[in-house]
Amino acid sequence: MHHAVYLPLVLPLLAAAAARPLAGRLPPAAAAWLLALSAIALALASSAVLGMLALTALVRIPLAESLAGMSGPVISQHDPASAPVAIAAGALLAAAAAAACRASWRRARALIAAGREARRLPGAGQVVVTDDQAADAYTLPGLPCRIVITAGMLRALSGPERQVLLAHERAHASGLHYLFTTAARLAAAANPLLHPVASAVGYTVERWADERAAAVTGDWELTARAIARAALAVTAAPPRQAGRAASALGAVSIPARMRRAGPVPRRVAALLGPPPQPQLLLLVAAVLLVAVSGLSALEAARDLHALLVSARAAGTS
């Protein structure tokens, strides 16, 4: 295999550095799709490369050599990865697989719990208002999705601001935004270098819902004011224990974003500033980065296949 095999292991660093600029400069829906799909592709490519490197360590084991009928010297001569590097790749792959499985299990349990909680909520409508005096609002994925808003949140907002809040949460529900954040979080679990990308996906789905709410109400300044006032209401309210399902699925909950002051001013500023325009150069650069990672992994697979064929031919001759 050529040294290009290491590209899929390095490119997630570039993706991590580019995630925030992409989230801020592209239209939110386009950014959410691009970042989520890129995270999945980069995580798959890096995991595949780790697996290929680990395989070269496996076939160097004398027992494996004899069983497979391969020549260890041929593999050592033509493989750019040393045995320690290949062993380290195997360890990283095992850790990544364990982390991804654990994250998948936790996410699946949270989604199931959220669906059950949504079905237990009173009434048949999509929106449920609770008597809780702490300001809160979140969307529970399920069939159908349910929107929970507390009396404390309604009391903190004016009538028009409540319409913004409802439009925001309905955008989360109709857009199935939890799928974007779930995909990005699982990719980051498999490759921790992608955590900034997962964070950017969380930000873009909130921006996506903000823009949708502004389009529904026709007032971007009102939407910005409602977001800021809701954030203040959440931070000023006494601490409360949210439902376990809502906490685990914080990516589809407004307060989970608002409790971190950083993204909220950015969202408000984005609503008050000029709308982001599609930027072909950024899109092409991002797609090329992912394409290079995938093509490098495919080339590494082709080279590994050729190496194993050569080693097998030398071992049986």
Image: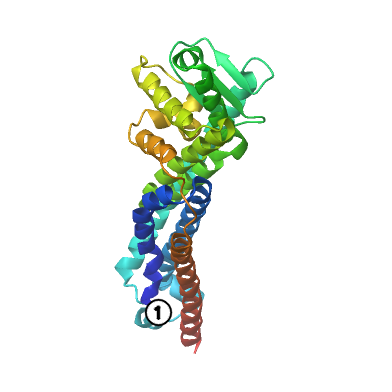
Element under disc 1: helix
Q: Pointer 1: what residue?
A: 75
Does residue 136 appear in this view? yes
Q: Is any atom of residue 192 visible in this view? A: no
What residue is shown at x 49% (from left), y 67% (from top)?
Answer: 291
Front-lying residue, 35 or 228: 228
Q: Mark 1 belongs to which amino acid?
A: Ile
Colour pattern of the rendering: rainbow
What is the quadrant of the N terminus in the image?
A: bottom left
What's the residue at 43%, 41% (across, down)? 203
Residue 65 pos. (x, y %):
44, 75
Q: Is residue 305 above or below residue 159?
A: below
Q: Where is residue 194? Give x, y as percent.
A: 39, 51
Q: In the rendered view, tell whether residue 215 sits above or below residue 183.
A: above
Residue at (42% x, 18% y) in the render: 241
Q: Position of residue 218 (x, y in %)?
A: 55, 33
- Position in image of residue 16 (x %, y %): 36, 54
Foreground: 123 or 88?
Answer: 123
Which residue of the protein is positioned furthest toward the right in this rendering?
124
Q: How busy is the neighbourhood of tag 1: few (under 14 within 10 Å), some, or many (20 plus)?
A: many
**Residue 239 sits in quarter:** top left
Is 231 or 59 nearer to us in this picture?
A: 231
Nearer to us in this view, 281 or 10: 281
Residue displayed at 67% across by 15% down = 123
Q: State the count of labels.
A: 1
